[in-house]
């Protein structure tokens, strides 16, 4: 499968990019680190981890990562597990008899691909934070988190539960939990999976309209980023699309902003870019969205 084609990255002067591997629960995640090409040896710079959405990859955020690096930050983009260049979880599908030797055996496995699993994606985002915390010249007291679309909800969830995140940007974020018939189906999938009446890890079922990959409904049943929003006490910027067609912003970004506004010590800025759809945030909405994020980091990192 191929990722949506976004405008190409034009690398800013003074920024370098190099590929790295982020390890998360034994799975290798394909990642890139962006750094200013000139850094004093003892410099301690702010850093930002960027997370993509459903069907995306590390390239979804490359223009944002390069822009932030051009302003003196160290940034990291990565691809979620089972997508594109990142590794996959394995599912045991058979074991050859009579070949056991201590803790080893000859087995047959299935590579799980293109799975949308909130539990794994949040864990991967946390591993990316671990990685950037150990990157040379990163000031661990100045780490920000940026997430887009479905990844915006994961960024909200992690930022609300990880003290290392000092500022947050979520653009066109899907934050609200499942509701209605899809929520009922997810509960059924969770029950059936636990009881062995459904595949332990789904592949090619419960397909989402106009979206690639397989949603892991058994874990989505328990995923609710909105319930974590009242824990956010760090400066949070939420950017929505004025003509959002994927989900109602009133139940997602706008609702999250209202919760933060009414939370003691909450700091939030809610912006709606008029005249753009969900994917328009990467096209005609890129300039205002990326600049708003850059300004946010300048104020709070």
Image (spheres, rainbow, N blue to C red):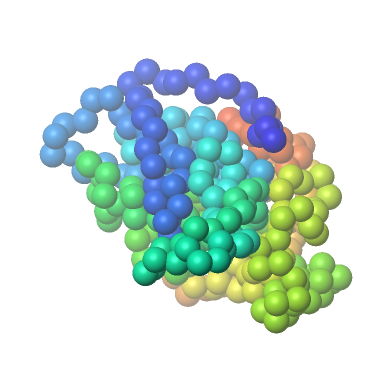
Place of residue 181 in the rendered image (x, y in percent of width and height, measured from the top left): 86, 70
Residue that lies at the very extreme toward the left in this rendered image: 42
What is the quadrant of residue 221 in the picture? bottom right
Q: Is residue 217 above or below residue 145?
A: below
Q: Is residue 26 above or below residue 192?
A: above
Place of residue 190 in the rendered image (x, y in percent of width and height, measured from the top left): 71, 75
Residue sitting at 76 percent across and 40 percent down?
A: 277
Q: Is residue 32 left or right of residue 133?
A: right
Where the N terminus falls, by quadrant?
A: top right
Residue sitting at 58 percent across and 56 percent down?
A: 108
Q: Can see residue 69?
A: no
Q: Is residue 189 above or below residue 38?
A: below
Residue sitting at 79 percent across and 57 percent down?
A: 205
Residue that lies at the very extreme toward the front in this rendered image: 98
Residue sitting at 67 percent across and 28 percent down?
A: 5
Q: Can see residue 141?
A: yes
Q: Is residue 223 left or right of residue 121?
A: right
What is the quadrant of residue 192 in the picture? bottom right
What is the quadrant of residue 154 in the picture? bottom right
Place of residue 139 in the rendered image (x, y in percent of width and height, measured from the top left): 25, 49
Decide which of 191, 181 is in the foreground and name it.
Answer: 191
Residue that lies at the very extreme toward the right in this rendered image: 181
Place of residue 48 in the rendered image (x, y in percent of width and height, measured from the top left): 40, 45
Total numbered circles: 0
Decide which of 3, 114 is in the foreground and name it.
Answer: 114
Q: Is residue 216 left or right of residue 88?
A: right
């Amino acid at each position: 499968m191929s990722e949506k084609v976004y405008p190409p990255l034009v690398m800013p002067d003074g920024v370098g990019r190099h590929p790295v591997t982020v390890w998360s629960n034994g799975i290798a995640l394909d990642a890139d680190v962006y750094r200013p090409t000139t850094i004093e040896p003892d410099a301690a710079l702010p850093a930002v981890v960027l997370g993509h959405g459903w069907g995306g990859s590390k390239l979804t955020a490359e223009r944002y990562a390069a822009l932030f690096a051009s302003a003196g930050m160290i940034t990291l983009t990565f691809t979620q597990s089972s997508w594109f260049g990142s590794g996959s979880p394995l599912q045991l599908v058979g074991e050859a008899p009579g070949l056991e030797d201590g803790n080893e055996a000859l087995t047959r496995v299935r590579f799980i691909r293109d799975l949308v699993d909130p539990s794994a994606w949040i864990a991967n985002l946390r591993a990316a934070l671990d990685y950037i915390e150990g990157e040379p010249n990163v000031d661990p007291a100045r780490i920000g988190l940026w997430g887009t679309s479905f990844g915006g909800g994961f960024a909200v969830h992690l930022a609300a539960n990880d003290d290392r995140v000092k500022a947050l940007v979520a653009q066109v974020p899907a934050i609200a939990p499942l509701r209605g018939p899809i929520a009922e189906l997810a509960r059924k999938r969770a029950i059936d999976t636990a009881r062995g009446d459904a595949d332990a890890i789904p592949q090619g079922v419960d397909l989402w309209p106009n979206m690639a990959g397989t949603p892991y409904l058994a874990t989505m049943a328990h995923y609710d980023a909105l319930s974590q929003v009242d824990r956010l006490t760090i400066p949070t910027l939420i950017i929505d699309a004025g003509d959002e067609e994927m989900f109602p912003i009133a139940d997602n970004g706008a609702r999250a902003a209202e919760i933060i506004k009414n939370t003691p010590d909450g700091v939030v800025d809610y912006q709606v870019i008029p005249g753009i759809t969900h994917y328009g945030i990467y096209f005609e909405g890129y300039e205002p969205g990326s600049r708003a994020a850059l300004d946010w980091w300048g104020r709070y990192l």
